[in-house]
Image: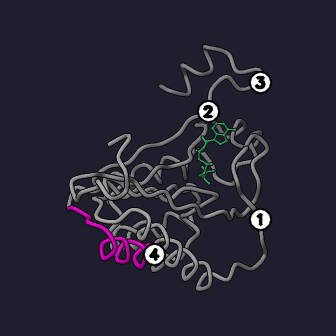
Amino acid sequence: MPNKKPSELTSSDEIALYIHWPFCISRCPYCDFNAHVRPNIEQPDWGKALLSELEYWAKNTPKRKIKSIFFGGGTPSLMEPSIAADIKDKASKLWTLENETEITFEANPTSVEIKNFREFRSAGLNRVSIGLQALDDNALKFLGRKHSRKVGILAIELANKIFPRYSFDLIYGRPQQTTTDWKSELH
Ligand SMILES: C[S@@+](CC[C@H](N)C(=O)[O-])C[C@H]1O[C@@H](n2cnc3c(N)ncnc32)[C@H](O)[C@@H]1O
C-alpha cells in the first residue's frame, strides 16, 4: 500500500522479499548483475549474515504479510539448500507467510545444480526460474554458458515434476541470430 507511515501498517499490508546470492561458477559475458566468482564461499557465514539482514528489515517493516520471496543472483542454486530453508523459516517467524506465498529461486541448468532441485523443494521453495538462455549448443557456448541444450531440457522436465510452478529465461536478438533461427529454436 503506497504512502503509508510505518505506524499505519497492518498485517494486511503485503511486502516481497528479495534475497541476493552474489556468487557464480563463472561470469557470463552479457551479465550486468552483482555476481562474483570466488574459489571458496563461506556458506555458513553468508547464511548467518542473511538471517541478521532479515531481522534488520523486520524491525523496519513490522506486521507485514509476505506476498513472495525471490532468491536471485548470482546463482542461488549454488547455495546450500539448508540456507534457503533457514531463511524461509526465519521469514515465517518475523512476518506472516501463507501457504500460497510464492518462493522462487533462480537456477542454472547444470547437472550439479539440478540434482539439488528436490532439496530446494523440501526446503519449502515452490517455484524455480531456470536460466536457460538458449536451446542451441553453439549459442550457449557463445553466451559462455556451462550447460548443454540437452541438460537445459532435462532441467525443465525435472522442474515440471518437482515444483508446482516454474519459468525459464531465453535471450533473443543475439548477434547473427535470424528470425528463422529463433523460430526453429523456439519450436
Ligand atoms: C542474473 S541471472 C541469474 C540466474 C542464473 N545465475 C543464470 O545465469 O541464469 C537471471 C537472468 O537474468 C537475465 N540476464 C542476465 N544478464 C542480463 C542483462 N544484461 N540484461 C537483461 N537480462 C539479463 C538472464 O536471462 C538470466 O536468466
Residue indicated by mark 2 = 171
Along the line of sight, the residue nearer the viewer: 68 or 121:
68
The Cα–Cα distance between marks 4 and 3, rounded to whole angstroms, is 45 Å
Mark found first going from the N terminus, 2 or 4 = 4
Marker count (numbered): 4
Q: Is residue 44 visible?
A: yes
Q: Position of residue 72 (x, y in %)?
A: 54, 56
Q: Nearer the viewer, mark 2 or mark 1?
A: 1
Disc 3: CA contacts within 10 A as few (<14), some (14-19) or many (>=20): few
Tags 2 and 1 touching, CB below 8 Å: no
Q: Is mark 2 within 8 Å of ligand 1?
A: yes
The Cα–Cα distance between marks 2 and 3, rounded to whole angstroms, is 11 Å
Q: Is residue 158 visible?
A: no
Mark found first going from the N terminus, 4 or 1 = 1
Q: Secondary structure at mark 4?
A: helix
Tags 4 and 3 touching, CB below 8 Å: no
Say left or right for 62 vs 22.
left
Q: Nearer the viewer, mark 1 or mark 3?
A: 1
Residue indicated by mark 4 = 55
The Cα–Cα distance between marks 1 and 3, rounded to whole angstroms, is 26 Å
Q: Nearer the viewer, mark 2 or mark 4?
A: 4
Amino acid type of the residue tagged 4 in the rendering: Glu
Residue indicated by mark 3 = 175
Q: Secondary structure at mark 2?
A: loop
> Which stretch did the figure color magenta?
84-98
